[in-house]
Image (spheres, rainbow, N blue to C red):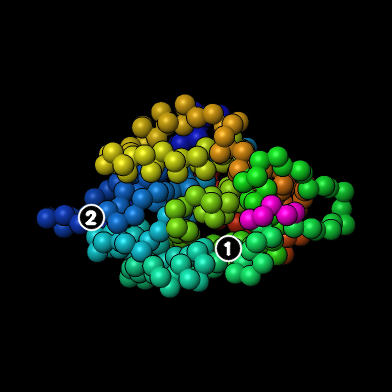
Amino acid sequence: MINSCFVKDSQKEVIIMAQSSTNLNKVVAPERVVVLRGSINFRDLGGYRNQRGQLTKWRRIYRAASLGNLTASDRQLLSDLDIVHDIDLRSPSEQQSYPDQQWPGVQLISNPLYPSSNFGRIVNHHRVRRFFNWRHAIPNLDNPVARIYQNVILSNHSQQAFATTFKTLLSQQNDDATVFHCAAGKDRTGMTAALILMALEVPDDTIIQDYLLTNDLYHYSDTHEPPTNDRIQRTVDQMNTKTGEALYIEGVLRTINEGYGGIAGYWRHALQLSANDLKDFRQRFLTDPKN
């Protein structure tokens, strides 16, 4: 499974307007990491193989850290990648203090994932009580950070924010793309990415690997060495997805799988989205590798 996590779609190359002295178009194959001068941890959710053998589409959904320090060339690149939605998951105060640098053709969507009031109930590890009318139980998690993540997943405010992200993706035109981000691109972004990949039926281990990549990308930024797909693959091969910080995102997966009977139950009962919406989402963002 690990060796199939990062799969290049060789049949779907894209034209990127490169900032160069010759100002020529360059044909560039999809890469896991989009290297920017003014941001790190900007990466593509494409190329992941799901449980049915399908691949998540490249160049359609991106996750990122802060976009407040983008250079002019960064902004032009994101425009050339047809990224038309910028979903900012940060709090209103974060957005005001360090606003995103926008690029041509983008729509900025303010979508704070954490509630601005009563947030202490989440960070103080008190279970957000929910009562369900079907036979599933919310799991008890031992790790304190995993319990915080769980409370976010169970929060009414956060569920509405997750739903907004999915609705934005469902409104996206076929050739367009969306990026969602928080400050570091790890917690709020990681939970959102996990829900997206779960909806696309990507295996749990792959979702955990995608979450853990944030740590290594920050390491690469310290060494000033842009990571290649090969280096990322070697990093993934060495990951232990059963210990440490992996428990944080694993708690999200357990909460949805055990508490809601899977992503379809969470999609319907928590996000208030229909089964047809889920079917449409998968048709939009999955592809058969044989095509």
Magenta span contains residue 131: no
Measuring from the top left, give residue 91's x and y in whole percent: 52, 67
- Quadrant of the rendering where the N terminus is positioned: top right
Measuring from the top left, give residue 170's x and y in whole percent: 57, 63
Q: Is residue 61 visible?
A: yes
Q: Nearer the viewer, residue 52 or 177?
A: 177
Measuring from the top left, give residue 108's x and y in whole percent: 44, 71
Residue at screen point 70% across, 65% down? 156
Disc 2 element: loop
Mark 2 closeness class: few <14, some 14–19, many ≥20 residues within 10 Å: some
Residue 266, image quadrant? bottom right
Residue at screen point 72% across, 42% down? 141
Disc 1 element: loop
- Up the image or down, 32 lies above or below 133; here it is above
Residue, disc 2: 18
Residue at screen point 76% across, 43% down? 140
Judge depth for marks 1 and 2 and give the one in front. Answer: 1
Give the magenta range. 123-127
Residue, disc 1: 113
Type of secondary structure dominating the magenta stretch: loop
Measuring from the top left, give residue 240's x and y in whole percent: 54, 29
Which amino acid is tagged 2?
A: Ala
Q: Earlier in the sequence, mark 1 or mark 2?
A: 2
Which amino acid is tagged 1?
A: Leu
Q: Nearer the viewer, residue 65 or 82?
A: 65
Mark 1 closeness class: few <14, some 14–19, many ≥20 residues within 10 Å: many
Horizontal arrangement in the rendering, residue 23 relative to residue 257 (left or right): left
**Circle number at residue 229:** none
